[in-house]
Image: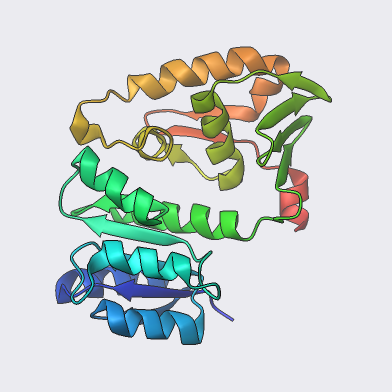
Amino acid sequence: MLPKLLIVEQNKELNSIMSQALIEEDYAVLQATNTNDAFIIAHQLNPELIIVDKAAPQSGGIEFCKSVRKEPAISRTPIIMLGATGNITERIEALDAGANEYLVTPFQMEDLLMSIKVLIHRGNLDTSSRIMSLGNIKMDLDSWIVTIAEKPVKLTTKEFRLLQELMEAKGRVLSRDFLLRRVWGLDKELDIQTRTVDIHMSRLRSKLGAASESIITVRNIGYRVDISPEWIRR
């Protein structure tokens, strides 16, 4: 059965573009033009992820997120909110309301697709352990502990989050802009240089030592990690 994604967007053109792109990626697309209908659809059909416009008719994206997070049956559903500006205050408001990601329109469809893949994968992690492995690197997401060959490695918050994003992507290439948004919560439009990502990645690699060979630089794009044989078997 195809993963179900719910789009809550009144802009017909954007709705059509997103729907077509998602269908081509083998997602089943559900649609709603207002938050009231979206809440009913989400409760009845339990989509794997919701994309909602911050300005969606009736309650708006912010109140919709709050309502979803209060409903036990769908409270853990990942939500991507679409906003018209990259204003940091609006971004924080969206995340505080329960959105997992905030994208500024217009956005690159590749960014949306990557965000969807990462969030759906994250939702499918074994929540009883929440431990990820790559070679002799292990990450405990609940305890915020990283070990290499059972020896703990002290990482900063940003370094931990960079490694987490890479490992959760399971070999997919993550652009510097994507990492900047996911780890720092900022867009390149806010004059935060993507060089910041490179600097922190260099520090992360230094702390990982020989294990850092699992992190691969993709020229002019970003970073990925080696694909683990365990991932392929799954």
Q: Tell me the quarter of the picture where residue 60 sits.
A: bottom left
- Would you say residue 234 is visible in this rendering? yes
In the foreground, 221 or 98 = 98
Q: Position of residue 13 (x, y in %)?
A: 16, 72
Q: Residue at x 37, y 79 (%)?
A: 39
State which quarter of the image contains the C terminus. bottom right
Going by the image, does 185 lie left or right of 34? Answer: right
Residue 171 sits in quarter: top right
Residue found at the far right of this picture? 150
Looking at the picture, tell me which residue is in the foreground, 204 or 135. Answer: 204
Q: How many marks?
A: 0
On screen, 67 above or below 42? above
Seen as rendered, the residue at the extreme front is 70
Q: On screen, 23 above or below 219?
A: below
Residue 111: tell me if it is visible.
Answer: no
Residue 26 horizontal/vertical position (percent): 48, 73
Residue occupying image coordinates x 72% and y 56%? 126
Q: Nearer the viewer, residue 28 or 119?
A: 119
Residue under the point 71% across and 22% down: 211
Quadrant in which the N terminus appears: bottom right
Observer-nearest residue: 64 or 216? 64
- Judge from the rendering whether residue 122 lies leftward or rightward of residue 233; answer left or right: left
Relative image position of residue 187 (x, y in whole percent): 27, 37
Q: How is the image coloured?
A: rainbow
The image quarter in which residue 194 lies: top left
Describe residue 221's horizontal placement relative to residue 71 as left or right: left
In the rendered view, does 61 fall on the left or right side of 116? Answer: left
Decide: is 180 above or below 17. Answer: above
Return the x and y of residue 91 as percentages of the image width and height: 27, 45
